[in-house]
Amino acid sequence: MLAVLGGALAAGAAETIAGKTIVGSWATPGKCGRPLSTIVVEPMGLSGEDFYCDFDAVSRSGDTIRWRGTCTFGIDEEKTAVTARLSRGKLSYRINRDGWNGPLQRCPK
């Protein structure tokens, strides 16, 4: 019993150190699945109704994730740095130095 409990504590500690995954769908509270309210976070990508980002590099410090790559907005493509942060189960993100979007809630699978 102690070995099992110790393993669970070790797994929980590892998740705390690494941070919780943000991969999945996120939306303005109460608006999962509605147009222009939902984004999808992938390990090396981020997309919304009117944009898609493909990243070459990712780094993480606690609950802050930074990606570098290219985002496409309509027909315009630009080099981009995206920062996302998780706080109290809510996700906020910004593209380049634009203002923060969010907080967003995780959508059910």
Image (cartoon, rainbow, N blue to C red):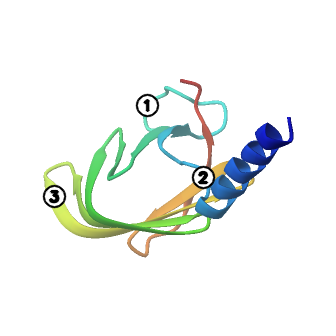
Q: CA distance from mark 2 to mark 1?
A: 18 Å
Q: Give the structural element (helix, strand or loop) at label 3.
A: strand
Q: Nearer the viewer, residue 83 or 1?
A: 1
Q: Is residue 87 above or below residue 81?
A: above
Image location (x, y in percent) of residue 26: 53, 40
Q: Is the residue 63 above or below the residue 32 in the image?
A: below
- Near mark 3 (Cα within 10 A), the count class, few <14, some 14-19 or many ≥20, is few
Q: CA distance from mark 2 to mark 3?
A: 26 Å
Residue at left 29%, top 47%? 51
Mark 2 and mark 3 lie on one chain; the one further toward the N terminus is 3
Q: Which residue is mark 3?
A: 76
SS label for mark 2: strand
Question: Which of disc 1 and disc 2 is earlier in sequence?
Answer: 1
Q: Nearer the viewer, residue 2 or 15?
A: 2
Q: Is residue 109 above or below residue 42?
A: above
Q: Which label number is shown at residue 35?
A: 1
* Dot 2 and dot 3 residues touching (CB under 8 Å): no
In depth, the one of 34 and 57 nearer the eye is 57
Q: Amino acid at mark 2?
A: Leu
Q: Is residue 57 left or right of residue 93?
A: left
Label 1 residue SS: loop
Proximity of marks 2 and 1: CB atoms separated by less than 8 Å: no
Count of marks overlaid on the render: 3
Quadrant of res 27: top right
